[in-house]
Image: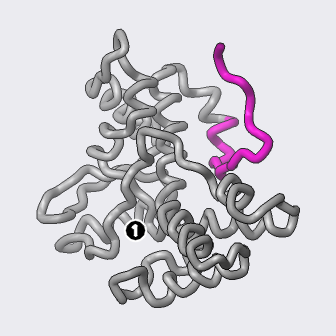
Amino acid sequence: MGFQGFPRRVRSIPVPAPLFGPLLEEIDDLDELKCTLRLVWLLQQKKGFPRFVTQQEVFADRVLASALSVDGRPDQGRVEAALSRAVGRGTLTTATVEQGGQKHMAYALNTEADREALADISTSAQLDKDQEREPWEAATERPNIFALYEANIGMLGPMIADELREAEDLYPVAWIEDAFREAVSQNRRSWRYISRILERWDQEGKHDGKPGRYLKKTRNY
């Protein structure tokens, strides 16, 4: 049936303006374009700074694997070639980082801030555990924050929708789902109660008592 159009509440992500200008004029390879667009999306799912993805994470991404498949089968060489072209064009920058005792190739947008941050990381011994990257999306679609709200609380209003968008940017999906689940179990079906749960986890840590990783300052990046 093909693409059925965007849903009424669709999430948008920021994309660097040159990608729709000079880069769009220059990129003449469809694989490179697909890879670049997907990397922009993947990087936006990361929290903290700098935002980067490892080569292993790129190869494991099911959407990119499907987009660059050959006869329906993933082709790692095709993905690697597209990454190489994006790096060669200057859209992406790379560095080697150490994580869990292993070295990984990392990719980030080729901005001055990200270049400097990756250089600092690559010269350090290894990433702290708290700097480890987010896991990728699950193979099946998960309900977004708007669907969770309507299913568990009620109809959305414009002001609440803005707060939900902000929360979706600040907290991981798993936290949001758990916060809704906890509110329902306590029969406290209100966004104010749920947002307070998320704020507490952010400040105090979730379950393990460790400091929260997803601090509100991440909204600056």
Asked which quadrant contains residue 149, the reply is: bottom right
Q: Residue at x 64, y 47 (%)?
A: 15
- Identify residue for label 1: 117
Disc 1 crowd rating (10 Å Cα; few below 14, some 14-19, many 20+) is some
Magenta-tinted stretch: 1-21
SS type, badge 1 = helix
| Closest to the observer, 181 or 111 | 181
Is residue 173 toward the left or the right of residue 19 in the image?
left
Q: Main secondary structure of the magenta part?
A: loop
User: Whole-percent x and y of residue 100?
Assistant: 17, 65
| Closest to the observer, 41 or 95 | 41
Q: Residue at x 14, y 58 (%)?
A: 102
Quarter containing the N terminus: top right
The kind of residue on which mark 1 rests is Ala
Is residue 209 toward the left or the right of residue 215 in the image?
left
User: Whole-percent x and y of residue 128?
Assistant: 26, 76
Q: Residue at x 36, y 14 (%)?
A: 72
User: Whole-percent x and y of residue 144?
Assistant: 62, 52
Q: Is residue 158 above or below residue 74?
A: below
Q: Residue at x 65, y 35 (%)?
A: 22
Is residue 112 toward the left or the right of residue 58 in the image?
right
Asked which quadrant contains residue 120, the reply is: bottom left
Asked which quadrant contains residue 171, the reply is: bottom right
- The answer to whether residue 182 of the structure is visible from this angle is yes
Q: Is residue 53 above or below residue 70?
A: below
Coloring basis for residues = one colour
Is residue 98 toward the left or the right of residue 89 in the image?
left
| Closest to the observer, 9 or 71 | 9
Q: Is residue 193 above or below residue 47?
A: below
Residue 97 is inside the magenta segment: no
Residue 16 is inside the magenta segment: yes
| Closest to the observer, 145 or 64 | 145
